[in-house]
Image: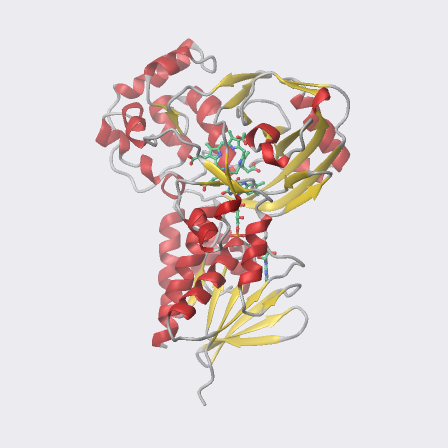
Amino acid sequence: MVERKHVAIIGGGITGLSAAFRLQKMMEETKETFNVTIIESSDRFGGKIETIRREGFTIERGPDSFLKRKKEALELVEELGLSDQLVSNNMGKAYILKNRKLHSIPESSFMGVPSLLKPLLDSTLLSEDGKARALNDLFIPPYPPFDDMSVGDFFAGRLGQEMVDDIINPLLSGIYAGDLYKLSLRATLPQFIGLENRAGSLILGAKQALPKKKTSQFATLKKGLSSLVDRLVETIRFPMLKNTCVTKIEKMNGRYKMSFKNGEALVVDGVIFTIPHEKTQELMSDCPYLKQLSAEPCTSVGTVAMAFDASQVTIQKEGTGFVASNKEPSTITAATYTHLKWPHTTPSGKVLLRCYVGKAGDEEILDETDETIILKSLNNLKDVVDIDGQPEFSVVTRLRESMPQYVVGHTQLLKKIEETLRHDYPRVYLAGASYDGVGLPDCIRQGNDAAKQLFNQLKLH
Ligand SMILES: Cc1cc2nc3c(=O)[nH]c(=O)nc-3n(C[C@H](O)[C@H](O)[C@H](O)COP(=O)(O)OP(=O)(O)OC[C@H]3O[C@@H](n4cnc5c(N)ncnc54)[C@H](O)[C@@H]3O)c2cc1C
Ligand SMILES: Cc1c2[nH]c(c1CCC(=O)O)Cc1[nH]c(c(CCC(=O)O)c1C)Cc1[nH]c(c(CCC(=O)O)c1C)Cc1[nH]c(c(C)c1CCC(=O)O)C2
């Protein structure tokens, strides 16, 4: 009898679970069967996704929702029969914190780039000089063709430093928690490359890039994002190992031998790595380009959820929350008015505020005690939200090295790594937040793609 081929998925976050689910689906749809083992080092699945329930609140310690525009998350929810659990947010307005005040983000802007002149001219975020400089974008010639450039340099060159510091940087920090002058434009916002050339300017181009319909952008699940993880774990029929850390991978007669911290080992024909890139690099230390990628930093961030009685809190400007300007000397980088953004998470008569702390170059706050983090967050919040007394309870979450920073040249480096893998490590794939997008839909897409490619390779092998 021929032994069944065996593959391992390393990491049980959303990427690894999506890859496992996709492999199972493809096996159900064809006559092919392989053994699959999912290996997770911690005592739970979900990785960055973690929902907790406390005193009637549904609290997300990591991501709180996903973009609907990128289809993969919605498709997965549907495939898992969870569509009836979907909730979309009913308010899209967010603010920028500057000089301890909240300012509206100019209307009809795309990633902070205004598509109309009036909202730009009316904005309280920019000085007259800053506005005049931003308008220069309409007249200056396009960039000569380039392969990659930092997001900060790209936008500052066209719209000026002030626009970047006070509008674009805060909004993008609300996605990447990163240093814009290091982040790669090609890896994060490729739709902007050549846009100013084709449209005549970025401002004119933003109009084309802006989604046509102004519908709700984000969705989540009624019982929290962990219910997506739970449903995946229930549905996946492969062995799923918890508390099992992969410490070594060696090539062995055309197969791969994986060693675990507990001394056990597993020999497999293919591997999907879904763990952070620097950990993958430790396991695959002879892959040269992976070493280069492992030099890319990961930012440590934290979230602070605080529950109040409604009588204690008055929100001055209603919306989903705010992000802080780059120059703002605040501990918090952003705050979500969770009870307004996601009313289903909060019992009636209560308020749930969630602050974000930590960004590239400013991560020491995570070494402070919970009490200090809560105190500092509350002090910042009190500038713009009327708060009476202390939270009824708080939940502090530290997500160390959790936001990968795609630096300039990231996409080209990924291509080289993929070529090397195809040549030197057949049937080994990399997927997840370290590579091609940090959002949940991007992670699911990468898990799906790795599963499809591995499945096809195994059929040929
Ligand atoms: C505070 C915060 C807020 C966010 N908000 C949003 C949001 O609102 N919307 C959105 O779309 N995205 C959001 N993101 C991004 C998104 O949550 C992540 O990019 C995504 O969850 C990453 O999934 P992953 O499976 O690639 O990695 P992870 O979730 O990190 O999973 C990797 C898994 O591998 C395990 N592992 C590590 N090493 C080993 C080893 N050696 N052996 C075995 N297992 C190992 C880990 O324990 C972990 O479970 C947010 C991220 C953060 C930090
Ligand atoms: C205004 C605001 C933002 N983000 C946030 C706010 C505060 C108020 C609120 O909760 O509404 C909150 C937030 N969300 C995320 C962060 C960064 C992580 C951190 O600092 O902990 C922060 C600070 C992750 C994210 N937030 C988002 C992603 C990416 C989702 C994806 O690309 O799939 C992540 C990882 C989505 C997001 N978030 C934001 C934008 C402009 C986008 C992209 C929207 C689009 O593409 O159309 C800004």
Q: In the rendered image, which quarter contains the C terminus? A: bottom left
Answer with left or right where residue 162 lies relative to residue 196: right
**213 or 284: which is nearer to us?**
213
Above or below: residue 218 compared with residue 159: below
Q: Residue furthest bottom?
A: 1
Corner quadrant of residue 240: bottom right
The residue at the point 62 percent across, 24 percent down is 330
At which x and y percent is residue 41?
Answer: 63, 61
Q: Residue furthest top?
A: 128
Q: Residue furthest front?
A: 84
At which x and y percent is residue 182?
Answer: 45, 38
Corner quadrant of residue 62: top right
At which x and y percent is residue 387?
Answer: 71, 20
The residue at the point 42 percent across, 63 percent down is 451
At which x and y percent is residue 299?
Answer: 56, 42
Q: In the rendered image, which quarter contains the N terminus? A: bottom left
- What colour scheme governs how the chains and residues are painted in the rendered image of this protein? secondary structure
Residue 364 visible:
yes
Corner quadrant of residue 140: top left
